[in-house]
Every structure is written in structure tokens, then in C-alpha cells.
Amino acid sequence: MLCKKCGSVVPDGDLVCRPCVARRGWEGIIGQQEVFMAKMLTGELQIRLARSSRAHPFHVALFANPGYAFCEANLRHASLREQSPYTSGLRMGCCAACLEVLDQVLADHRSIEEAKARSHGTQV
């Protein structure tokens, strides 16, 4: 059988498309990150960075699950770890894929904050 959503082959005996379930789970995890953005932007919460060697860029660890990065990289075995406030300079040494996802989460956060402000008649 083929998945109606993504077209993947669903093996006989499976009730769901495993790639779709994994994607929805990941989307849920990324969606949870938005609640941490305000504290990150004010400096109350630092970004956790991890990499396996100095030859690789830092990955940005998820706030709710630091064993994984925003780019889905597994960080459980990363030996080099740091914490840092979120600054533009920090971005230079980070994984581009992590930053792309982080930027999207930040944009979503800002949209939510702007919508809240408009509904209360204030400006962000």
C-alpha cells in the first residue's frame, strides 16, 4: 500500500506510514521549542552548543531535548559542549542547517508575539 500523504510504501501489516509519523513527531518537537524563544532572546536562557570535534561546526541543541540538534543531528556522543547567550557572533561557528530551523522557530515566535500584541492593542 502507498501512503496517501507522501507516497511512501507502507509495508504489509503496518497501520501507519513510518516516515509520516516520524516527520509529525519531529514537527511537534520543533513546535515545542517556541516556548523557550522569549527567554533565549532576553538572555535568561543560554543556547547549548555541541560538536564532535573542533573540525566541525557547533550544532544548536534543542531546549527540550538536548540529545538532538535543531538539524536533527544526534548529539548524545558529542564531546565538546558549550553554553552561550544568543548573539549574532555566535551564529558564525554554527551548523547552517541548525540555524535555518532556529531562524524559522524565531520567526514563528515573533509572529505569535506580534499577534498577541495586536490583540491587546500594544506594540512589540
Image: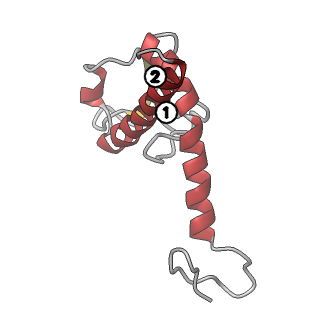
Residue 88, given in percent of the width and then of the height, sits at 27, 21
41, above or below 57, in the image: above
Residue 11, given in percent of the width and then of the height, sits at 65, 84
In 3D space, how far apart are the residues under numbered discs 2 and 1 (Cα atoms)? Answer: 7 Å
Q: Amino acid at mark 2?
A: Ile
x 27%, y 36%: residue: 55
Residue count near mark 2 (Cα–Cα under 10 Å), binned few <14, some 14–19, many ≥20: some
Residue under numbered circle 1 = 61
**Residue 85: numbered disc:** none
Precedes in sequence: disc 2 or disc 1: 2
Residue under numbered circle 2 = 47
Name the one closer to the observer, 72 or 6. 6
- The quadrant of the rendering that contains the C terminus is top left
| Residue 110 as seen in the image, left or right of residue 30 | left
| Residue 67 as seen in the image, left or right of residue 50 | right
Identify the element where label 2 is drawn: strand
103, above or below 37, in the image: below
Q: Are marks 2 and 1 in contact (CB under 8 Å)?
A: yes
x 46%, y 41%: residue: 70
- The quadrant of the rendering that contains the N terminus is bottom right
Name the one closer to the observer, 88 or 124. 124
x 41%, y 15%: residue: 123
Q: Is residue 99 visible?
A: yes
Q: Quadrant of residue 120?
A: top right
Q: Amino acid at mark 1?
A: Ala
x 46%, y 22%: residue: 47
